[in-house]
Amino acid sequence: MYKPPFEGDQRTIGYVLDDRVKKYPDKVFGYITGETITYAQLGERVNRVANSLLDLGIKKGDIVSIMMSNCPEYIYTWFALGKIGAVEAVVNTAFKGDLLEYFINYNDTSVAVVDEDLVERFYSIQDSLGGLKKIIVRKLSTFAGNIPDTKFEIIPYEDLLKGSSEDPKVERPCYTDTLTIMYTSGTTGKSKGVLCSHNHCYTAASYYIEALGLTPEDTIYNCLPLFHMAGAFLAVQTALVLGTTIAMVESFSASRFWDDIRKYKATVFNCFGSMFPILWMLPEREDDADVPVRIMLAIPARADIERAFEKRFNLKIIQGFGSTEMNCVVLTPLNEEAPVGSVGKPLPHSEIKLVDENDNEVPTGVRGEFVYRPKKPHIMMSGYYKRPEATAEAFRNLWYHTGDYGKKDENGFYYFVDRKKDCMRRRGENISAAEVETVVNKYPGVAESAASGVWAELGEEDVKISIILQDGAAPIDPVDLMRFCEEKLPWYAVPRYVEFRSDLPRTPTAKVARYKIKEEGVHDNLWDREAAGYKIKKR
């Protein structure tokens, strides 16, 4: 059994990094978006960025927002912030407009580190970003001569790599200090910031290593974004803790996926969201089974093709259940045959129950809400940032309530059933219904709207928006509504289906019953964006 090699304050990202640099200086840490980086190079560059951030006035506890696609600079920045005790606040690269404004202000961000092709989004909302003073731009030379008048101090990322390569002279953080703020979709309001301590992130990696039976000889392939826990904690940080190599590309590409796997001799990868059915639908090749991968974490894996997928690609699938707040807490056992469709059994550090609406445990085979308690301290989130009421509500009756329904069989295997909360999942992204509705409700003539999910052909959900028009309002052109939404929403949150109604189903307390709209599914009265040929631009 894998035994985590660090304890207490050794479980900080700076301590683990320094240890790995000393032990494996010449070993390749990562093949990262075309660049090969050894552990020694990683340690030196992280120190340079850390000292430069100190020179910019960043100190322990300060929050710095990172809005970058997968790249070496993302990792340098994240690790450097952790080394000096500052906090990374992740920002999805699809955010813009009102959403971007909300997250930057909510984070209390004074400094942001941003990709060169995303920085213009900040200029358009700069008057609303009262606390943001400095923007560090990766590959700023791309915009040479094109920087508009702005109140922000613009700093080329290359300047950070000119800092001292010496270990930063600061008080190191404690393992209970916050390393990262990640976001989870809200149910009745804005998304919440999940406070992830150094130990929370370390634990995610170490339990993942144990559950999948990983060794320092494994190579981890990652195409998932670093603003998600699967890309950050279950890939990059796992490689660091294990002292192994990660192969990371900028994004998922079905056409090059297996070629990448072979190129980097990857033995493990994480498969989230619609990746699973997309890979299955690739044209069959004679060498499908001739891949170095031996194991993959799939959340979710479609039950109808799970075993066929394993046979076709000659690998073992591990399924699981978890969240940013908890990490993975249920996984299918490595050395035990799990029933098809099961998400597995609780890990040794997890207490799991299924409960009814009054938090009473439900019998075997009966649907209930997943609730969770950790058996060790500081291995799950520390709470929701600036949301004490939401934190208390989530931990009512001393159990963390996931908002997800499941069932358990007589052999102790658990199954995911559906989401209780009013959020949807599309293309691996969680979507808050409230955030979609906030945008749609601003469109002229809309009196009220309700966003809901409908099951899609790739095993996730498409977004449906149900609209009540204002009295006397002219009919709305769905195409124009799409253009409006595309300007203000991330690409994955733009609705596919539009319907116009005279009323919405409601609960006894007059709240919109989105689950009833979801139950209606796809019907003839819906306008379908894809059928109409409207294409969404992803960036």
Image (tube, helix red, strand yellow):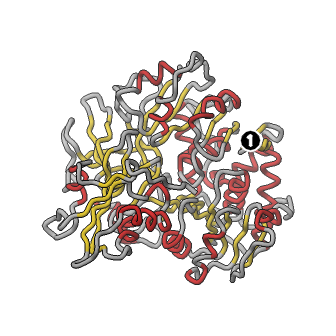
Horizontal arrangement in the rendering, residue 537 relative to residue 161 (left or right): left
Please state, as top left, top right, bottom left or bottom right, where the C terminus lies in the image: bottom right
Residue found at x 67% / y 58%: 78
Does any portion of residue 169 appear in the rendered image? no
**At which x and y percent is residue 54?**
76, 71
Horizontal arrangement in the rendering, residue 85 relative to residue 279 (left or right): right
* Image: 145 above or below 309: below
* Image: 532 above or below 363: below
For the residue carrying disc 1, how many other residues have a C-alpha within 10 Å: few (<14), some (14-19), or many (20+)? Answer: many
Does any portion of residue 439 appear in the rendered image? yes
SS label for mark 1: strand
| 44 or 531: nearer the viewer | 531
**At which x and y percent is residue 49?**
78, 62
User: Dot 1 corresponds to which residue?
Assistant: 29
**At which x and y percent is residue 298?**
47, 36
| 460 or 142: nearer the viewer | 142
| 210 or 376: nearer the viewer | 210
Residue found at x 21% / y 50%: 520
Task: Name the amino acid, label 1.
Answer: Phe
